[in-house]
Image (tube, grey):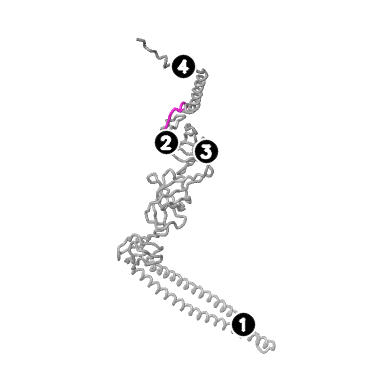
Amino acid sequence: MKIADTSAQDIALAPRDPRRKWLLLAGIAILAIALVAVAAPWVARWASATVSVPYERVRTATVQRGDLVRDVSVQGRVVAAVSPTLYASAAGTITLNVQAGEQVVAGQVLATVDSPELTNQLQQGEASLAQRKLELDRQRIQTRQQALERRKAADLAEVAVIAARREKRRAEQAREKGVIPEIDYEKAQDDLQNAELAYEHAVADADLYDERLSFELRASAFEVNTQELVVEDLRRQVGDLSIKSPVDGIVGDLLLEQKAAVSRDMPVMAVVDLTRFEIDAMIPESYADDLAIGMNAEITVGGQTYDGQLVAVSPEVVNNQVASRIRFADNGPTGLRQNQRLTTRILLAEHADVLMVQRGQFLDSGGGRLAYVVSDDRVATRRQIETGAYSLGAVEILSGLEPGETIVISNLDPFRGADTVLLTD
């Protein structure tokens, strides 16, 4: 039996072109070169980085120029700026006219003190004053009468002088005619001298008596004025027995019971002015040296910010904190309540046009002297920096960084101090 071969199924092929082989090899070579070119930077980054950290685990910020405000944010509580405590001005029995929490107005009588002793002193003082005034009026009348008598004596002495002069002229005329003896003429001269001397003494005595009476009147008037001052002070003390509200507000705590016996200067009640509030805040001791009265502040109330001013700083440190008092620049918002908690930001200093970056944990983990600058290919390079002033949200960069550079502001511990770190996707 003859077995058939497969020659009838064979197909004759044309010989291959050797150029196609070289073209295929060339294409493979070009593709390999392209892959190497694309992968080379990535390989270089990978090779240069000693540590790799996922990019999503870090936070970055851009270095920029701006105004940095150094500040401190603290929690404070609302207190009344004016909350006077009222005291009893004298010993006696207290009568309360208001209740705790009651609205009052300035000048309203809140309580009265019944002090019989003080009232009696006032009555005695007024009686003594009236008596002294009567005595002064009587003395004035008597003074005018005595002065009139002295002037009368002086006038009579003057009349005697005139008469003596007339008698002397008559004696001179008679002497010239020789009708009177010489001794009578000399007597007329002596009478004139005596009259003139008596007149001079009468005038001087009247003037001196007027001065003495005027002095006595002034002394009596001073006594009356002194007694008037005593009575005025007693009236003031009696008026102070009515305890009045110094401000518009509400009555705070009543410190005494109705009709209780009180002594002088014993506290009775407190009045709270609800229109003027301040903030009591405790500031960390580390900021104590930077605080100064008059510093500006910002007080946040219900999402709104109000201007304030630091008006008091305690010289004492308690539990590593310093007590301070912040006052609203204007009247402040309405609806505040005693002991309400508010956030206050005190502006310690302002630095204009400085290089700064957002604050982050890199300041703590790097000690404020280390930063990692992130390049466009996500390689973080270690760099030494110098920081300056701090604020709540930013830190001043003194050296080591340039505007526009991006740095890692999150915790640097995962970088393990490496010079370069690859931030992977």
Q: CA–CA distance between discs 4 and 1?
A: 194 Å
Q: Quadrant of the N terminus?
A: top left
Q: Please give the residue where the numbered disc 3 appears in the rendered image.
A: 404
Q: Secondary structure at mark 1?
A: helix
Q: Please give the residue where the numbered disc 2 appears in the rendered image.
A: 56
Residues tagged 2 and 4 counted as in contact (Cβ below 8 A): no
Q: CA–CA distance between discs 1 and 3?
A: 122 Å
Which amino acid lies under the numbered mark 2 shown in the image of this protein? Answer: Glu
Label of residue 192 in the image: 1
Image: magenta residue range: 46-55
Q: Please give the residue where the numbered disc 4 appears in the rendered image.
A: 12
Q: CA–CA distance between discs 3 and 2?
A: 21 Å
Q: Which residue is at a point 43% across and 48% down the rendered structure image? A: 315
Could one spot residue 178 in this view of the protein? yes
- Residue 55 image offset from top left, x and y in percent: 43, 34
Judging depth in this view, the residue of 152 and 178 nearest the camera is 152
Q: Nearer the viewer, mark 1 or mark 3?
A: 3
